[in-house]
């Protein structure tokens, strides 16, 4: 039986994972954003206007005095409930159209 080959044969799948080559490019600081103006101080960063807690408290008190839930108020002004919640928390981003709608229904003004 010398004509038989008894060496073990191992079958393996070909690897489908191929390592991608990563290329790093050095960008010069003056070439990053030519059109974007550079800020010099932290004072130049625009502040996002929010409703404030005093306005939120007045809205929630007026809503409760009219015996409306947040959901009912939201459907009356055609906004989401999250908008009403954020206004009452004082963290909502100021939107004049929403403020007008709230003023119409609840008779609440924003003091600027």
Image: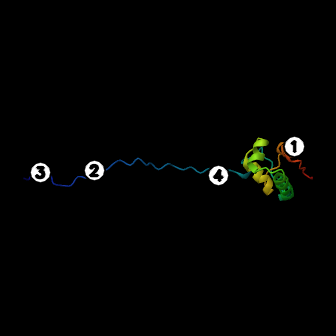
Count residues near mark 1 (Cα–Cα under 10 Å), then give few for <14, some for 14-19, many for 20+.
few
Which residue in the structure is indicated by mark 1? 104
| 68 on left or right of 4 | right
Relative image position of residue 89 (x, y in whole percent): 78, 57
Which circle marks residue 57 in the picture?
Answer: none
Please, is residue 54 above or below residue 109 in the view? below
Q: Kindly identify the residue that appears in the image at 18 percent across and 55 percent down.
A: 7
Seen as rendered, the residue at the extreme left is 1
Which residue in the structure is indicated by mark 4? 26
What separation in Å lies between label 2 and label 1 (alpha carbons)?
77 Å
What separation in Å lies between label 3 and label 1 (alpha carbons)?
96 Å
Q: Nearer the viewer, mark 4 or mark 1?
A: 1
Relative image position of residue 46 (x, y in whole percent): 83, 52
Q: Looking at the image, is mark 3 or mark 1 earlier in the sequence?
A: 3
Comparing 82 with 104, the one in front is 104
Q: Are marks 3 and 4 in contact (CB under 8 Å)?
A: no
Q: Kindly identify the residue that appears in the image at 64 percent across and 51 percent down.
A: 26
Q: Looking at the image, is mark 3 or mark 4 earlier in the sequence?
A: 3
Which residue in the structure is indicated by mark 2? 11
Label 4: which secondary element: loop
Q: Looking at the image, is mark 4 or mark 2 earlier in the sequence?
A: 2
Q: Nearer the viewer, mark 4 or mark 2?
A: 2
Which residue in the structure is indicated by mark 3? 4
What separation in Å lies between label 4 and label 2 (alpha carbons)?
45 Å
């Amino acid at each position: 039986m010398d004509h038989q080959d008894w060496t073990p044969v191992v079958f393996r799948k070909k690897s489908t994972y191929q390592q991608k080559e990563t290329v790093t490019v050095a960008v010069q600081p003056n070439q990053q954003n030519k059109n974007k103006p550079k800020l010099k101080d932290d004072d130049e960063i625009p502040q996002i206007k929010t409703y404030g807690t005093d306005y939120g408290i007045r809205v929630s008190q007026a809503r409760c005095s009219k015996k409306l839930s947040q959901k009912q108020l939201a459907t009356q002004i055609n906004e989401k409930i999250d908008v009403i919640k954020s206004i009452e928390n004082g963290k909502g981003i100021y939107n004049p159209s929403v403020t007008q709608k709230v003023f119409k229904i609840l008779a609440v003004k924003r003091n600027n």
